[in-house]
Image: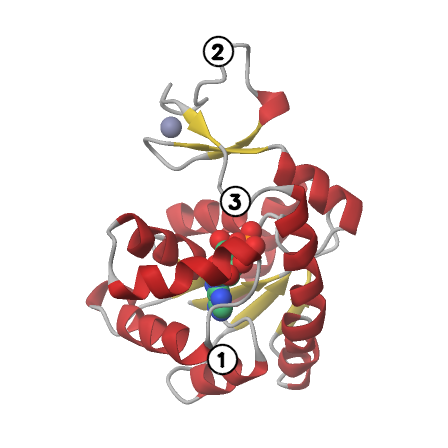
Amino acid sequence: MKLMFVGPPGAGKGTQAAVVSEKHGIPHISTGDMLREEIKNGTQLGTKAKSYIDAGDLVPDDVIIGMVQQRISRPDAQKGFILDGFPRTVVQAEALEGIVKLDKVFNIDADDEALVRRICGRRICKDCGAIFQAAQLDSSQSCLKCGGQMRIREDDNEETVRQRLKVYKQKTKPLIDFYDERGLLYNVVSESIEDTTKEIMDVLSKME
Ligand code: ADP
Ligand code: ZN
């Protein structure tokens, strides 16, 4: 199954993608994670991407498209994948159409203030990458999955978040109509993380 999750930052795309990836045994392809890995490894691509990410802007389309094209050509992605954070512009969506055909696009949304609150409270495990809310953790603030130390993502500060939301509305939101016109869109109506997972799993079980 070739799936894509679209929605504003903080909507829970990554969290849902991780669950679906595990249940269905298909890779979770997050362009944000891939870019952060490039930055960590000090690659040329990473160096180029960093200034855009820190400002809350989008990394140029050609850089992203090349990176995704390579990733989805790998053997583990042949029977399916979950795209999280890509495409993010109409240009990227058109390029993707030329490479592969998606089976379903899930639109996950939430209101702006909830998104800002969630992103500012987001903590990520240094060891296993699990994502939790600071309020879910105990005083030791260690990972609920592996006990590792939790950290805050560099671009998860209020100023950058507001910019990311603005960019989402201008550049990514048009993709909702783009995929609706192609009959691929499913709008998630659930609000909690658990209900959203159930709703997505339900749709997927009817597709098989
Ligand atoms: P979030 O959805 O929480 O904003 P991501 O981890 O998906 O975060 O992305 C972080 C940043 O990486 C974005 O703000 C953007 O700068 C860059 N990025 C990720 N995916 C793309 C993409 N498809 N096109 C352009 N830039 C991207
Ligand atoms: Zn962990």
Sequence-wise, the earlier of marks 2 and 1 is: 1
> Quick check: 85 above or below 114?
below
For discs 3 and 1, the disc positioned in front in the rendered view: 1
Tag 1 residue: 92
Q: What coloring was used for the rendering?
A: secondary structure
Q: Which secondary structure, mark 3? A: helix
Return the residue nearer the eye: 40 or 144.
40
Which percent across, then down, holds residue 183? 64, 81
Indicate the amino acid at tag 2: Ser
Identify which residue, 113 or 132, lies in the foreground.
Answer: 113
Circle 2 SS class: loop
Q: Disc 3 marks which amino acid?
A: Thr
Q: Is residue 141 left or right of residue 176?
A: left
Q: Is residue 201 above or below residue 120?
A: below
| Secondary structure of residue under mark 1 | helix
Q: Which residue is mark 3?
A: 15
Residue shown at 77% from the left, 50% from the top: 112
At x 64%, y 72%, the residue is 185
Q: Which quadrant of the view contains residue 181?
A: bottom right
Residue identified by numbered label 2? 140
Pointer 1 residue Cβ closer than 8 Å to ligand 1: yes
- Answer yes or no: disc 2 within 8 Å of ligand 2: no
Q: Residue 153: x and y, percent? A: 49, 40
Q: Earlier in the sequence, mark 3 or mark 1?
A: 3
Can residue 36 be seen in the rendering of this structure?
A: yes
- Name the residue: 73% across, 48% down: 190
Vertically, is 153 above or below 24? above
| Residue reaching furthest to the bottom | 98
Query: Is residue 205 something that shows in the picture?
Result: no
